[in-house]
């Protein structure tokens, strides 16, 4: 019997010669991370152990990205606890405001995650790194504390659902639309504690930014992890990051699923007729095609987050916003995912396009994605965002509404003042 990519990575990190879904394994962790919301709890638990050092100060990242720059005294204290811990235990991968970025965009950019790695993070969207052919998943803060101490974690081996994408994609359609379509088809619990393996001809031609978007939202279908086989494009991405930030890193281990691997399901889609998708309130599975949504006026548009705050997203948005103006009643908030993306957006003139159109261009931050700051919604307000969740009260008042889309739909919506297809503007 063959194994899937996920099973092979877990088997290797558990030191096992065989493995089966449903069993519990103790695995060695290649990298672990926490942010300014989740890491403080992990730090508290770690300190109770009375240890003088962490398992490896080079394989931990502490990233204050959710409520930073600090929005109030509580968030300032949360962020400070990360800085103090990093200094005390010589954590090498700690980034302050001005150097940091949204964790799930920053770590791949910095060459800290590679194919075949096993990564855990006290944040549910840690599943993002599956785009590089790594096993990555979110864990609780106490599990993160244990990993700080031991470099290990326990996991239940998930079954795998194989998603095969065939056909060719239309203009303005990207990874965000593929994953929204998928979640719409299977529901928010359709892949509960399953590995979601994305494959097929469409995935092979998908740019890395789009792959990150897809794996990022595996959790929105209940998935334990999302994963894509690391091909030449993924290896090229990793080697480029190594060369720029981690030249000492060389080894890359690519795992592929065996032809006789066992899947709990195989689901195939023909995406040839797929249109840009929008998730309506209040679930990522409540999807509609953008052109079928009529007269939904918005108060705010957010372009950013660990899902769609990368450079390609900003370029797409700027293409639509150039020589256009945001509707007077709309707040357009553009938040690049990392400082490097911020700098490149300035160099390319994208930032100027956003500001000239009537938007704001912010420092890297999770911002309003989880109702943190930089764009909280008041009662009755609506936002269209390139973020990953639109639960009740996710971005502010429980009587506000959040819609999800790709960057093209978001930019067009800012111009029209209501949800629309990009072709309505361009």
Image (cartoon, rainbow, N blue to C red):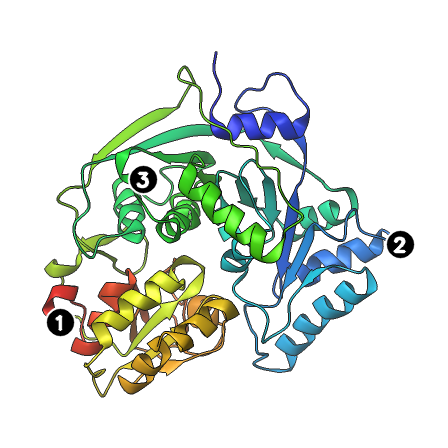
Q: Residue at x 26, y 84 (%)?
A: 357
- Location of residue 419 (image quadrant): bottom left
CA gap between label 3 and label 1 equals 28 Å
Please tell me whether mark 2 sits on a helix, a strand or a loop: loop
Task: Name the residue carrying label 2.
Answer: 52
- Tell me if 148 is positioned left or right of 295 in this view: right
- What residue is at 54 percent from the left and 42 percent from the top? 136
Q: Quadrant of the C terminus?
A: bottom left
Task: Choose the circle earlier in sequence order: 1 or 2.
Answer: 2
Q: Is residue 201 visible?
A: yes
How many other residues sit within 10 Å of disc 1, few (<14), some (14-19) or many (≥20)?
Answer: some
What whole-number distance in Å separates the C-alpha atoms at marks 3 and 2?
45 Å
Q: Is residue 295 positioned above or below 130 on the image?
A: below
| Residue ID for mark 3 | 203
Q: Position of residue 391 (x, y in %)?
A: 38, 60
Query: Quadrant location of residue 245?
Result: bottom right
Helix, strand or loop at mark 1 = loop
Q: In the rendered image of this protein, does residue 10 appear above or below residue 407?
A: above
Mark 3 / mark 1, whichever is N-terminal = 3
Nearer to the camera, 43 or 189:
43
């Amino acid at each position: 019997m063959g194994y899937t990519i996920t099973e092979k990575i877990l088997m290797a990190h558990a030191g096992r010669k065989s493995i089966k879904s449903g069993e519990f394994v103790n695995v060695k962790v290649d990298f672990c991370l926490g942010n300014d919301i989740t890491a403080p709890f992990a730090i508290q638990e770690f300190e109770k152990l009375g240890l003088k050092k962490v398992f490896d100060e080079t394989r931990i990242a502490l990233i204050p990205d959710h409520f930073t720059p600090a929005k109030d005294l509580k968030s300032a204290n949360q962020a400070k606890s990360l800085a103090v811990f990093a200094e005390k235990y010589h954590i090498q991968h700690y980034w302050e405001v001005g150097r940091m970025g949204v964790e799930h965009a920053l770590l791949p950019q910095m060459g800290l995650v590679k194919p075949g790695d096993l990564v855990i993070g006290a944040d549910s969207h840690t599943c993002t790194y599956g785009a590089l052919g790594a096993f990555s998943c979110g864990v609780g803060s106490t599990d993160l504390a244990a990993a700080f101490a031991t470099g290990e974690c326990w996991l239940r081996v998930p079954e795998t659902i194989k998603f095969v994408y065939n056909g060719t994609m239309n203009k303005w359609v990207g990874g965000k639309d593929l994953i929204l379509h998928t979640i719409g088809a299977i529901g928010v619990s359709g892949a509960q504690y399953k590995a979601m393996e994305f494959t097929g001809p469409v995935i092979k031609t998908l740019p890395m930014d789009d792959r990150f978007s897809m794996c990022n939202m595996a959790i929105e279908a209940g998935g334990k992890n999302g994963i894509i086989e690391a091909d030449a494009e993924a290896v090229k991405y990793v080697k480029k990051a190594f060369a720029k930030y981690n030249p000492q890193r060389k080894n890359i281990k690519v795992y592929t699923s065996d032809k006789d691997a066992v899947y709990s399901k195989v689901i195939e889609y023909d995406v040839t007729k797929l249109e840009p998708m929008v998730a309506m309130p209040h679930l990522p599975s409540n999807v509609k095609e953008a052109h079928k949504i009529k007269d939904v006026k918005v108060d705010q548009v957010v372009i950013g987050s660990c899902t769609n705050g990368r450079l390609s997203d900003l370029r797409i948005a700027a293409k639509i916003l150039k020589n256009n103006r945001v509707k007077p009643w709309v707040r357009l908030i553009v938040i690049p995912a990392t400082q490097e993306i911020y700098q490149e957006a300035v160099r390319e003139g994208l930032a100027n396009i956003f500001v000239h159109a009537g938007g704001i261009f912010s420092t890297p931050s999770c911002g309003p994605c989880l109702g943190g700051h930089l764009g909280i919604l008041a009662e009755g307000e609506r936002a269209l965002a390139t973020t990953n969740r639109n639960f009740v009260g996710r971005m502010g008042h429980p009587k506000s509404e959040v819609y999800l889309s790709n960057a093209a739909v978001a930019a067009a919506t800012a111009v029209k003042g209501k949800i629309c297809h990009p072709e309505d503007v361009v």
